[in-house]
Amino acid sequence: MKVRKAVIPAAGLGTRMLPATKTVPKEMLPLVDKPVIQYIIEEAVDAGIEDILVVTNRAKSAMDDYFDYYPELEERLERAGKERELEKVRRAADLANIFYVRQKETKGLGHAIWRAKRFVGDEPFAVLLGDDIMRARTPVIGQLIAAAEKYDASCVGVQQVSTDAIAKYSSVQISPLEERVFAVSDMVEKPRPEQIFSHYAILGRYVLRPGIFNVLEDLEPGYGGEIQLTDGLKALCRRDKMVAVDFEGKRYDTGNLKGFLEATVDFSLAHPETGEWLRGFLKEKVKEL
């Protein structure tokens, strides 16, 4: 069955980016000339996704406003002959069919995904975390969709990380199926050294079959007292097929300051309006050090 829908959990409080995120949602922080969440939505759209649900909270109405039309601004830009700017403004509103639901209680990522049950229905769906930006020739979520459809399975996006880093993520137990694709038989959230299955960590992209909702509905709180998506996936992979894709591309965690700055530099260097200037600027800065 074709994957047509995506869910973007974006209800977190952004505590790693305070004080900027006190009043501005972390997903709306500008990365060069677009907010972080627009890159994520564009990735989904480029992979063929038609409908997108953003899981928010009561402090994040700015996202809803951003992906809507702004007649007063558009009229002023049109009168001023600023066609390029007008096109950029309208593009955000026309990217996809975007819907919203609030996570009324902060109960964890698993609970946020469960809130999408009515939107998803009985279809497989993609999940793209609102903190994680991917740079890849082929959309990362598209790489997962291809594997999920080929194997008729749920799919998680993974990459190898260091022993120190794996403790921050989810370690998966895998066996090879083909190049860069593995069968998943178990996983653990934020493992201690003796719990590590492999150095492949789940990094912000998933394609899930709707059976995950039945799992999440009965799931007890886990790490941090929250409903952990990893705990739900652990149960799901024991009763249903699941694969992992070692995806091609670079991932940026824009939910922390260092990751956000790394993404800002790399995306600025790749941008046609800022790349050449920034290279010169950085060369001069290096000379000053």
Image: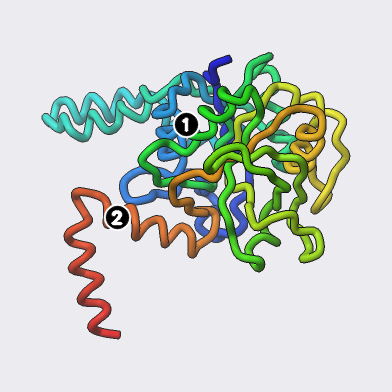
The amino acid sitting under disc 2 is: Ser
Count of numbered tags? 2
Query: Could you tell me which residue is drawn at 54 percent across and 59 percent down?
Result: 256
Image quadrant where one finds the C terminus: bottom left
Decide which of 150, 227 is in the foreground and name it: 150
Above/below status of 13 relative to 280: above
Residue 139 image offset from top left, x and y in percent: 42, 36
Residue 221 vs residue 205: left or right? right
**Which residue is at the far bottom?**
289
Image quadrant in which you'd find residue 100: top right
Q: Which residue is mark 2?
A: 268
- Which mark sits nearer the N-terminus, 1 or 2? 1
Q: Which residue is mark 1?
A: 142
Image quadrant in which you'd find residue 217: top right
For the residue labelled by badge 2, is the local secondary structure a helix, a strand or a loop?
Answer: helix
Q: Dot 2, how many residues are within 10 Å of its Cα: few (below 14), some (14-19), or many (20+)?
A: many
Q: Is residue 122 visible?
A: yes
